[in-house]
């Protein structure tokens, strides 16, 4: 799972730092439909492809007998910080992605030990 998360988070960071990827992300956030349940529901729908990627890799980890974190754990610990950096001009890179994965896995490990 470590390798899958690391590869995925590095790919997301790389995609977000390209001119097209960064602009696409910013436009998506700015123009996401609000939906009947308000702005958050529409913006969340824009994240569905990334959520599906996370879910798929966690399901593969579980199938291998690993104890993956929750989808929202990956979202809050990895995807959220990468997107936040992109929105505010702090380009995420492989080192940032690796640090986020390390923090998530350390948190998951410490929670499993409790």
Image: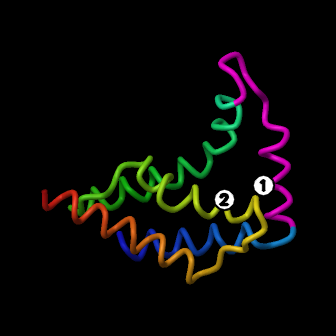
For the residues labelled 2 and 1, say whether their Cβ atoms are less than 8 Å apart. yes
Q: Which mark is residue 55?
A: none
Q: Name the residue under label 2.
A: 83
Q: Report how far apart the C-alphas of labels 2 and 1 lie in the structure.
A: 8 Å
How packed mark 2 is, by other alpha carbons closer than 10 Å (few <14, some 14-19, many 20 or more), is: many
In the rendered image, residue 47, in percent from the top left (x then y), is placed at: 64, 45
Residue at x-position 70% and y-position 16%: 36
Residue at x-position 79% and y-position 64%: 21
- In screen coordinates, is 2 left or right of 49? left
Element assignment for label 2: helix
Q: Mark 1 points at which residue?
A: 25
In the rendered image, residue 17, in percent from the top left (x then y), is placed at: 76, 72
Residue at x-position 28% and y-position 61%: 108
In the rendered image, residue 20, in percent from the top left (x then y), is placed at: 86, 65
Q: In which quarter of the image is residue 95?
A: bottom right
- In screen coordinates, is 108 left or right of 46? left
- As displayed, is residue 29 above or below residue 22? above
Q: What type of secondary structure mainly makes up the magenta span?
A: helix
Query: Residue 15 magenta-drawn?
Result: no
Query: Residue 33 magenta-drawn?
Result: yes
Residue at x-position 58% and y-position 55%: 80
Q: Give the range drawn in magenta.
A: 20-39
How packed mark 1 is, by other alpha carbons closer than 10 Å (few <14, some 14-19, many 20 or more), is: some
Q: Quadrant of residue 42?
A: top right
Element assignment for label 1: helix
The single residue placed furthest to the bottom in the displayed view is: 95
- Which mark lies nearer to you, 2 or 1? 2
Pick the front one: 8 or 76? 76
């Amino acid at each position: 799972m470590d390798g899958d998360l690391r590869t995925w988070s590095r790919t997301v960071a790389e995609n977000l730092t390209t001119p097209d990827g960064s602009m696409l992300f910013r436009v998506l956030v700015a123009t996401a439909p609000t939906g009947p349940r308000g702005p958050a529901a529409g913006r969340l729908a824009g994240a569905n492809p990334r959520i599906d990627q996370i879910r798929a890799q966690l399901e593969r980890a579980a199938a291998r007998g690993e104890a993956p974190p929750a989808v929202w754990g990956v979202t809050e610990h990895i995807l959220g910080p990468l997107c936040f950096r992109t929105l505010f001009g702090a380009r995420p890179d492989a080192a940032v992605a690796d640090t986020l994965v390390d923090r998530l896995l350390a948190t998951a490990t410490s929670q499993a030990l409790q």
